[in-house]
Amino acid sequence: MPDLKTFLEENREAFVESLKELLRIPSVSTDSRHKGDVKTAAEWVADRFRELKFETQVIPTEGHPIVFAQSPPVPGKPVALVYGHYDVQPPEPLELWTTPPFEPTVRDGNIVARGATDDKGQMLTHVLGAMAWMKSVGELPIQVKFLIEGEEEIGSASLGPFIEQNKELLANDVVVISDCSQFGPGQPAITYGLKGIAYFELKLTGPNRDLHSGTFGGSVRNPANTLCSMLGSLVDEHGWIHIPGFYDDVKPLTGDERENFAELPFDEESFKKQLGIDAVHGEEGYTTLERRWARPTLDINGLTSGYQGEGAKTVLPGVASAKFSCRLVPDQCPDKIADALREHLTKICPPGMKMELTAHHGSPGFVVSTDSPYIQAAKDAIEQGFGNAPVLIREGGSIPIVANFAEQLKSDVLLLGWGLDDDNTHSPNEKFNLGDFQRGIEASALLWAEIAKITK
Ligand code: BES
Ligand code: ZN
């Protein structure tokens, strides 16, 4: 048997081939046409665990299957549970991809495909790290459980009840998740906070059909105009959100935290350049990192009304709708925000307009303590795997189920992102750096040894 390090080094190419196999499966969870593909991806993941002789289950749900597997118990040692997801976001718009989204291609040291970083590539680092132990040493130094789901990108509706009903099966000391980012290239990070989310859809209906905008304009309230002014009134030029009660439960940033953020080498000029913007924008009184990581926001995610085809059509549309979401911070509660929003929109919706508000998924924000022994173990493993000590950061994305692990299973949570902010997650040409893929596998393998040193 080769030793662990030799095995990791000698299998670089095999790891990439394995990732490519998974990336070829179009497991788009939100699109019912891909239900079969989502199941195929679940089975593919389960097969990796079966190969290692881990006790493995593929659990059907009302939505997509949950994959659970576990290595043999190691008495007296902590138990880790790896959470990840094998589902992906839709690849559209297809015409903006340089190569097809489900034909993984290596370019400039990156693998390009939908799901490369979010989350197939990152999730697989832990599967392959465990495989390296099994195939070199023959066993893992601690018990590692895996909970890999297929509904993360649509709000994890089936997983909450599954956790509630399987607390013993899932019992662990620390949950390990790689579904976020490093601070920057060459600067790994441990993420100690994520935002929550409350997602909405607002539909306004005016006249009973689309109208000639000359014949009827000026006499009928236009749903598209009204939608713009209603949504426009929710956030002002200072970046403040005008929903009564919205800020009531927001936990303010501490002075220490603001100092820590300010010490990070964030380069605003290159941030702007990377995004092609000439000015940053957000809530007054906060820095860009503070706004991105620790202040609540409201963004429109999609707008639909009237004529969208080529050329011009003079129409006064009968309907207008928008999808929009608030990113939340501790201790804001998604249900409370939904109630406050509904009350406010009902109040400002003018006569001549029918309003329907749908609250889609919601999940709370999350912050973990940074002085646990598991954070220290992760720091040591990352420093060895990446050759560079990690910094502590928060991030603006959401992993809906993350709070459940702390609340329902009383677990510590480690968010170890191997991705980069410019990985084009949810966008065309999603990528994952293959150097980071390999370093992630190594850091994961080393993490199990570091956690084994912790006395329970
Ligand atoms: N990997 C992301 C979460 C993420 C993104 C964490 C960026 C940190 C930084 C995850 O797959 C995701 O996209 N989550 C959704 C959740 C939503 C659909 C409920 C999100 O944040 O939009
Ligand atoms: Zn995602």
Image (cartoon, rainbow, N blue to C red):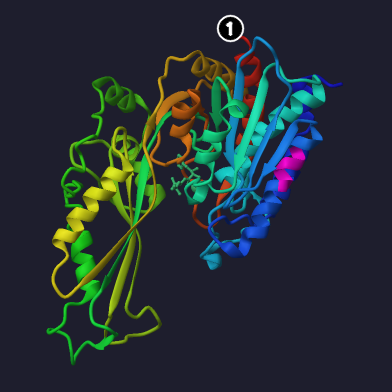
Q: Residue at x 31, y 33 (%)?
A: 330
- Residue 404 is inside the magenta segment: no
Q: Residue at x 46, y 27 (%)?
A: 406
Q: Quadrant of the C terminus?
A: top right
Is disc 1 placed on a helix, strand or loop?
loop
Can residue 48 be seen by looking at this rendering? yes
Q: Which residue is more in the foreground, 11 or 335?
A: 335
Amino acid under disc 1: Thr
| Image side of residue 162 versus residue 242, left or right | right
Can residue 280 be seen by looking at this rendering? no
Residue 237, compared with residue 370, is above or below; it is below
Q: Quadrant of the N terminus?
A: top right
Q: Which residue is more in the foreground, 331 or 99?
A: 331
- Residue 46 is inside the magenta segment: yes
Residue 197, compared with residue 207, is above or below; it is above
Q: Which span of residues is magenta-colored?
A: 43-48
User: Can you name the residue that lies furthest to the front here?
Assistant: 165
Q: Which residue is more in the foreground, 98 or 304?
A: 304
Q: Position of residue 156 (x, y in %)?
A: 50, 45
User: Can you name the residue that lies furthest to the top here?
Assistant: 455
| Image side of residue 366 versus residue 402, left or right | left
The prevailing secondary structure element of the residues shown in magenta is helix
Q: Which residue is mark 1?
A: 455
Q: Residue at x 51, y 65 (%)?
A: 93
User: Can you name the residue that lies furthest to the bottom here?
Assistant: 215
Q: Position of residue 427 (x, y in %)?
A: 49, 55
Q: Position of residue 239 (x, y in %)?
A: 20, 47
Disc 1 residue: CB within 8 Å of ligand 1: no
Q: Position of residue 170 (x, y in %)?
A: 59, 28
Please identify the quarter of the rendering in which residue 203 is found.
bottom left
